[in-house]
Amino acid sequence: MPLLKDDMPLMKEPHPSPQAPLPWVLPSLFAAFNVVLLVIFSGLFFAFPCRWLAQNGQWAFPIIAGLLFILTFFSLISLNFSDPGILHQGSNEQGPLMVHVVWVNHRAFRLQWCQKCCFHRPPRTYHCPWCNICVEDFDHHCKWVNNCIGHRNFRFFMLLVLSLCLYSGAMLVTCLIFLVRTTHLSFSMDKAIAYPLGCGDPRPNSEGGEELSTEGRGHGGGRVNGEQG
């Protein structure tokens, strides 16, 4: 006896699995790696070129570089753990069918509905796909610190950019001055550390050494001739 269509068992259609959120472990490790890299390079910088300059009475460069490092490290840590202006999720009572209009500078703006946060977003507020949050005055998501840049931490971001540029310039100038002051010295660990940072030439000045030795032989010969005379 053939089965009727209505008598056939109903099969449930497979539903697509929900998309997993973006992993947060790798971005967090990358941000922590940047902090560790800053500390390691700064430690080598202060332990070798700055130490030599300080031992020879030139304290201005290590002091200025040290102050800029403290400012850079403070702004970097503050930006890592700062609140960019997170707007908390709304309630289920609200819906996308409701219309919200706000007036800004005598202009009307219709608030956009965020499906993930379930509320109407204010103007200049966007949903960050990396952090899965809505940020007020959203500028961008900075992967170097694994945090969004928004209304509440934009000043920390500008402070980090400014202090990092000044600190990099101070490191470059200090390493170049160190390499210039030590051209007459033989190759050492201090030059090996300062060369990648200052992009200088860590090799000893062989021509200067030959000239010095030639002059020394000349003076020595003059003294011998004088004694003989």
Image (cartoon, helix red, strand yellow):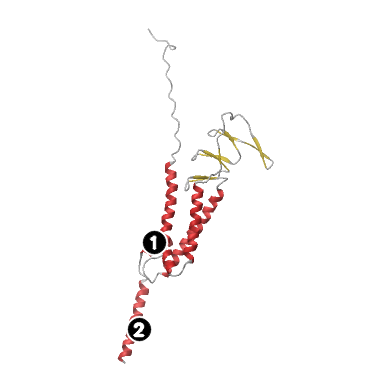
Labels 2 and 1: the sequence-earlier one: 1
Residue type at mark 1: give it.
Ile
Residue placed furthest toward the bottom: 229
Residue type at mark 2: give it.
His
Pair 2/1: label in front: 1
Q: Which of 46 and 192 is in front in this view?
A: 46
Residue under circle 1? 193
Whether residue 162 appears in this view of the structure is yes
Which x, y percent locates residue 139? 55, 45
Residue under circle 2? 219
Residue at mark 2 to residue at mark 1: CA–CA distance? 37 Å
Which x, y percent locates residue 136? 57, 42
Residue placed furthest toward the right: 106
Identify the image quadrant of residue 7: top left
Q: What element carries label 2?
A: helix
Q: Nearer the viewer, residue 2 or 128?
A: 128
